[in-house]
């Protein structure tokens, strides 16, 4: 037992939070591991999306991951509102990207009637990294609650959620964090919403309203089985149920690898690795008929506006054959129908040589 890298099972979620401070740029008390991503988006919206007759809108982007779209839409309907009136979708420019100025202009256009803005840190399809600090500050100055879905950003780019004053954020652990499909997800709740005050020594504390369950209750009294809910201070007080120890073991293992390095170091390798992949992709296109290129990289060319992922928009009809050829050569590469291949060289385990090998296989698949 002494040699186990795991902590006692009641402390496992907290251990994962402790291991995530650098990952998301927050204090461990602002981080909680619980449930899965969409469930956590709902849990956060239950506490943070408080529509009233004046402010009822949610600003999102044109092509969110469908689960995020459903979550937002269903929250609006749950509050008895009409998604046609309360969902504001920011459309991209012709290049599939959404300039920050457009986000800010949308905030301005709906400033008085918006309750919440919920955007992806990195857009899963285009790979665009949003300007989280600027958008957060701009929306908050106008009284709008700001949440981020960091599914494709956590473990990929540097984040400073506390300093950026984000209200809440959610992420899964089965992309860049490598904890395995369906593993326990993470959430950030800014410290100001985690306060638990015992006014005049009363036994019933005041705290931000949320959907509660016994695992959000303070560990010291959790097993007293009393019906006065005393939340754990911080993000941990937003837990509901007893988490799966097996799932948390895989999250803890995955995070312990991140703790051997830093997001700053990973990011600095990622910048070069992705630039190398971009260079080799451009070379392929340079060798083909300029009027009929095989593909177009739709992810921003500016490294500050992307993570490791390059979204390669293939010429119509190529995706299935290319994906099959890649797979036959041992490359597992994500495809998003109808035409996008997401190429993401991950600094934790991809080498420059892997990027080069991938390009040789891609060339073969394209008949070059
Ligand atoms: C951006 C985004 N949102 C939501 C989800 C759904 O996650 P979950 O099945 O854990 O709810 C995913 C999963 O890939 C995702 O990438």
Image: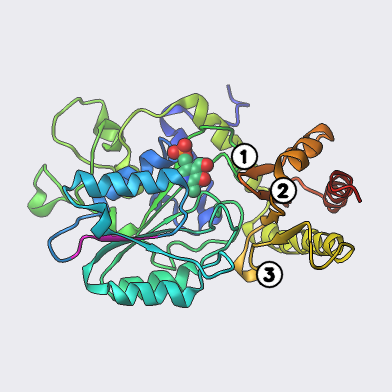
Q: Position of residue 167 (x, y in %)?
A: 34, 60
Q: Nearer the viewer, mark 2 or mark 3?
A: 3
Per the rendered image, the range of residues in magenta is: 55-60
The span from disc 1 to disc 2 (Cα, nearest Å) is 10 Å
Q: Is residue 32 visible?
A: no
Which SS class for mark 2?
Answer: loop
Residue drawn at x 87%, y 50% as measured from the top left? 363
Q: Position of residue 112 (x, y in %)?
A: 22, 73
Which SS class for mark 1?
Answer: loop
The residue carrying mark 1 is 178
Q: Are marks 1 and 2 in contact (CB under 8 Å)?
A: yes
Q: Is residue 276 left or right of residue 303?
A: right
The span from disc 2 to disc 3 (Cα, nearest Å) is 22 Å
Which SS class for mark 3?
Answer: loop
Q: Earlier in the sequence, mark 2 or mark 3?
A: 3
Query: Magenta stretch: dominant SS?
Result: strand
Residue drawn at x 81%, y 37% as measured from the top left? 325
The residue carrying mark 3 is 301
Q: Is residue 62 left or right of residue 96?
A: left
Q: Nearer the viewer, mark 1 or mark 3?
A: 3
The residue carrying mark 2 is 348
The span from disc 1 to disc 3 (Cα, nearest Å) is 26 Å
Residue 215's label in the rendered image is: none
Other-residue count near label 2 (Cα within 10 Å), few / some / many at <14 / 14–19 / ≥20:
some
In which image quadrant can residue 297 be found?
Answer: bottom right
Q: Are marks 1 and 3 in contact (CB under 8 Å)?
A: no
On-image quarter of the N terminus: top right
Q: Is residue 136 above or below residue 220?
A: below
Q: Is residue 69 left or right of residue 53?
A: right
Q: Are marks 2 and 3 in contact (CB under 8 Å)?
A: no
Closer-to-camera residue (180/262): 180
């Amino acid at each position: 037992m002494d040699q186990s890298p795991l902590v006692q099972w009641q402390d496992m979620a907290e251990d994962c939070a402790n291991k995530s401070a650098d990952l998301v740029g927050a204090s461990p008390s602002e981080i909680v591991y619980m449930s899965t991503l969409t469930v956590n988006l709902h849990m956060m919206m239950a506490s943070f999306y408080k529509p009233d007759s004046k402010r009822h809108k949610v600003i999102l982007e044109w092509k969110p991951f469908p689960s995020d779209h459903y979550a937002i839409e269903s929250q609006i309907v749950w509050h008895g509102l009409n998604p046609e009136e309360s969902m504001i979708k920011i459309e991209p420019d012709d290049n599939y990207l959404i300039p920050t100025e457009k986000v800010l202009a949308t905030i301005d256009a709906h400033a008085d009637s918006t309750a919440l803005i919920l955007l992806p840190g990195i857009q899963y399809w285009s790979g665009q990294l949003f300007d989280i600090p600027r958008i957060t500050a701009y929306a908050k100055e106008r009284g709008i609650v700001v949440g981020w879905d960091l599914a494709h950003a956590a473990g990929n780019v540097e984040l400073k959620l506390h300093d950026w004053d984000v209200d809440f954020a959610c992420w899964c652990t089965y992309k860049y964090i490598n904890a395995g499909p369906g593993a326990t997800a993470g959430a950030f709740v800014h410290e100001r919403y985690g306060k638990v005050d015992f006014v005049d020594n009363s036994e019933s504390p005041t705290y931000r309203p949320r959907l509660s369950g016994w695992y959000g209750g303070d560990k010291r009294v959790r097993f007293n089985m009393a019906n006065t809910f005393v939340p754990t201070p911080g993000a941990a007080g937003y837990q509901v149920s007893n988490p799966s120890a097996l799932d948390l073991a895989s999250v803890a293992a995955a995070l312990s690898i991140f703790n051997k390095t830093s997001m700053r170091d990973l990011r600095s390798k990622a910048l070069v690795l992705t630039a190398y992949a971009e260079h080799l992709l451009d070379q392929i296109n340079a060798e083909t008929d300029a009027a009929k290129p095989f593909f177009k990289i739709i992810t921003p060319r500016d490294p500050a506006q992307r993570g490791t992922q390059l979204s390669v928009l293939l010429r119509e009809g190529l995706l299935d054959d290319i994906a099959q050829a890649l797979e036959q050569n041992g490359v597992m590469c994500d495809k998003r129908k109808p035409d996008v291949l997401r190429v993401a060289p991950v600094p934790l385990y991809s080498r420059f040589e892997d990027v080069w090998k991938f390009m040789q296989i891609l060339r073969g698949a394209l008949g070059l």
